[in-house]
Amino acid sequence: MAGSPVVERLDEDTFPKILLRNARVFADRPSMREKDLGIWQTWTWSQVLEEIRSFAIGLQDTGFRPGDKIAIIGANRPRLYWSMVAAQSLGGVPVPLYSDSVAEEMAYVLEHAEVRFACVEDQEQVDKLLSMSEQLPKLEHIVYDDPRGLRDYDHTRLHSFEQLQVNGRAALAADGAREKAWLAGIAATKGADLAVMLYTSGTTGRPKGVMLSFDNLVISARNGNAFDKLNETEETIAYLPMAWIGDHVFSLAQAYLAGYCVNCPENLDTVLSDRREIAPTYFFAPPRVFEGLLTLIMVRMEDAGRLKKKMFDSFMTLARRVGEPILNGEKVSLVDRLLYQLGEFMVYGPLKNQMGFTRLRVGYTAGEAIGPEIFRFYRSLGLNLKQLYGQTEASVYITMQPDGEIFGDTVGMPAPDVEIKIAENGEVLYRSPGVFVGYYKNEEATRTTKTEEGWVLTGDAGFIADNGHLKIIDRAKDVGKLTDGSLFAPKYIENKLKFYPNVKEVVAFGDGRDFCGVFVNIDLTAVGSWAERNNVNYASYQELAAHPQVYEMVRSHVDEVNRDLANEPMMAGAQIKRFLVLHKELDADDGELTRTQKVRRSFIADRYAPLIEALYDGSTSKHVRTEVTFEDGRKGAIEATVEIRDMQTYPAAGSGLREAAE
């Protein structure tokens, strides 16, 4: 069903104001859904207004004041989204945190942000906060959504979300002036006010609090909606961390501006099945989600019968040849179009249905680079998957890919109202209405990131291609050179290896060294399935990772990557000469990844220094002992003798880097 354009007023510049508009314009349209005990519960925009209003009044009567910070901790739940807008309606500032953060990480953010209130999902998060009470003297009140397990707790500073709503409704019924005062407070909010504080993932040190105003978010969301023609008929699913700027923009800012419905899955384990039921029209995921889906598909096809596997391979060969041209509206022969339609019926349609993408109108991936091969796989199925380049500091949008101009090796053109320039050292800079206010209590970091003219230094190296699209090479600080002068871009190399379904993570080394060497993490799901099919017995990840046949599998992938790199003059010198399969999975709890699953290179370089040394001193194996953190917080250690393999490299197909540079 086509949506109707919303007539926006200039004074509708904060989310509480836009909520009032939506409750009037889209009163009976669905605003949010949540799956609970297998049943989808729906709230309309008018109902959401009532939920937020009653909670805001209850929160105010608990002592919440303008300028107060409220931490939001938990999985994607309607009440947690409502609590953010309720706090904003009272002049407060929400501070979403990663719910899987360990106590130390969480304590730092809560203390640094000077949080007085917290709204959390359940007992687990309540216990985590209570365990940090001595470190957080400013944290006075904790509101929880799910009451299970909390009945016998001391409720002096604990409050149920539901009870605050009951209190709020009672206060509104007893005093008619309360609602008028609340509405007057919303009218007093303005676009320049602080809307939210989102903490960076901390790849290079302590997380920084990124202050975003309503103007930053509202203008960016409005531009994003207009770019992809999003309206109130869209459906999306909220499953990514609420502390991540991507979720904040896609599940709150853009939803409020367009009036579309946000669906919260039952839990992380049911996201795929819940997405199949909802069939979102608008979807966002970082590359690791698309990589995981591709792994699942490939594993299932390996287990499929011979006929089904042959049909899949045949139609995917066709899709790789004509799928993207058809999607882009290019000329394709009638025979190929008819064959592709048959493939849609036999293979592509069922695949999209299994992934929950039957109705997908536009999908995005961002957060880090996605392998071009993975990107093309989804587009070849007829899915309008795009890349965007963004940052928390930009309110997401820096570049976007227009329909019909989508390339796997670039991230698009400047988004609406965004200016981009490339510094002399190759670093990408941008300026836009979405540029953050500053880093909270860190003026020095703000000055080094944002110039007086409003240009933001991204820290990424890139260039503008001949077609006007931005191409990101890698993090500027990570791009280096081998001792012979060859360009070394670790992320570029890592993404080539991560295309293979049985490779989960890769860390490349080489800057200032004689050659490129890599650590490889296998994907336990994919390799475990292979082991089962081939009667390979193993008792742990460590044992499977060290298996000779697994090493041979990885060796073949590295060899293919080297052949590809040899055909790229700029990267031919950075072919992989040695590799090892790491004896443990890289884990955020061990500090090896950020909470958004990005590799913390400097930490890994220190932690695995003996293995890196062995890569470069000619060793064929190395015995190591590594400390690990278990799910319950206990510490332990694993020991292993890690094998190191040499690889063949190939002559460059064209001129090398130095010749190209000259």
Image (cartoon, rainbow, N blue to C red):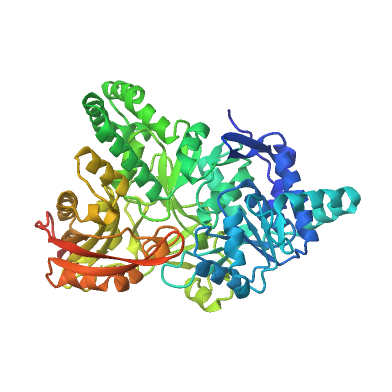
Spot occupied by residue 269 in the image (x, y as percentages of width and height): 47, 43
- Whether 189 is drawn above or below 20: the answer is below
Q: How many marks?
A: 0
Spot occupied by residue 190 in the image (x, y as percentages of width and height): 71, 59
Q: Image quadrant for the N terminus?
A: top right
Q: Image quadrant for the C terminus?
A: bottom left
Q: Is residue 477 visible?
A: no
- Which residue: 60% across, 65% down? 129
- Which residue: 59% across, 34% down? 39
Left or right of 413: which side holds 335?
A: left
Q: Nearer the viewer, residue 219 or 515?
A: 515
Spot occupied by residue 630 in the image (x, y as percentages of width and height): 41, 61
Image quarter of residue 513: bottom left
- Which residue: 71% across, 34% down? 28
Q: Is residue 107 visible?
A: yes
Spot occupied by residue 607 in the image (x, y as percentages of width and height): 31, 71
- Which residue: 31% across, 39% down? 377
Q: Nearer the viewer, residue 84 or 467?
A: 84
Which residue is farthest bottom? 444
Image quarter of residue 184: bottom right
Image quarter of residue 302: top left
- Whether 18 is drawn above or below 99: the answer is above
Left or right of 660: which side holds 587?
A: right
